[in-house]
Amino acid sequence: GQQLNQSPQSMFIQEGEDVSMNCTSSSIFNTWLWYKQEPGEGPVLLIALYKAGELTSNGRLTAQFGITRKDSFLNISASIPSDVGIYFCAGQGAGGTSYGKLTFGQGTILTVHP
Amino acid sequence: GAVVSQHPSRVICKSGTSVKIECRSLDFQATTMFWYRQFPKQSLMLMATSNEGSKATYEQGVEKDKFLINHASLTLSTLTVTSAHPEDSSFYICSATTSSYEQYFGPGTRLTVT
């Protein structure tokens, strides 16, 4: 089945630093999504990417859909304490029975020290 | 927009009893809803795909007779954990898709079986 490898697993950074995390897949996806999850809550959609090569920003967040459709990265600039949480990448099925389903990466736990 | 709610947010039940969790899309109609399970510090694991008016499609290894899913309307899906056991204790999260196939997640339900 489809698998996503997300790295790094965790990051400990100082406030103000930039952050980068990425996901790679053994399969092609039609859509890449990035979510943030805080303790005891559901994931919240940060950025959705629909086209290979697409680069999209949402405030201090920037994400790109890889040209091969098998990878994506998320950058957070000038981190602040409220950026703390678990960040998940997710690929959305390319067709057939997997259409619409999400496959999640393992998550990146982000800790920001003031 | 695109708000998904879940009820209850937390539930504690005794072993052998059944528990129903509701997932509602509050401001949009969702033809498809998904149910996930998440263990502490792990990623989301898809349990089943629920389409309005039809039987749910379960992922491999998920017992359909134990996790009953009903998608009665375009805004409501329910997950019933039957004859719950302590190993069923987990964080259950639903999501609903918009017409553009973006998935929006509910806040999750923490189930504890004693």
Image (cartoon, coloured by chain):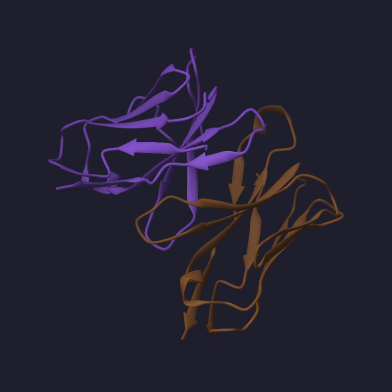
For the point 65% across and 55% down, which residue is it? Answer: A4
Residue A71 position within the rendered picture, expressed as x and y whole percent measured from the top left? 76, 58
On the question of residue A106 being in view, the answer is: no
Residue A96 position within the rendered picture, expressed as x and y whole percent measured from the top left? 72, 28
Quarter of the image that includes the N terminus of chain A: top right
Q: Colour of chain A?
A: brown
For the point 62% across and 79% down, which residue is it? Answer: A78
Q: Is residue A11 above or below residue A37?
A: below
Q: Is residue A58 left or right of residue B96?
A: right
For the point 65% across and 79% down, which residue is it? Answer: A18
* Quadrant hosting residue B83: top left
Q: Is residue B84 left or right of residue A77?
A: left
Q: Is residue A49 above or below residue A106?
A: above
Q: Is residue B20 above or below residue A14?
A: above
**Viewer-closest of B69 and A73:** A73
* Quadrant hosting residue A39: bottom left
For the point 49% across and 80% down, which residue is it? Answer: A112
Residue A29 position within the rendered picture, expressed as x and y whole percent measured from the top left? 75, 45
Seen from this angle, which residue lies furthest top?
B53
Q: Is residue B40 above or below residue A76?
A: above
On the question of residue B15 being in view, the answer is: yes
Q: State how many labels appear.
A: 0
Q: Is residue B17 left or right of residue B73?
A: left
Residue B16 position within the rendered picture, expressed as x and y whole percent measured from the top left? 15, 34
Q: Is residue A51 left or right of residue A100?
A: right
**Viewer-closest of B40 and B25:** B25
Q: Colour of chain B?
A: purple
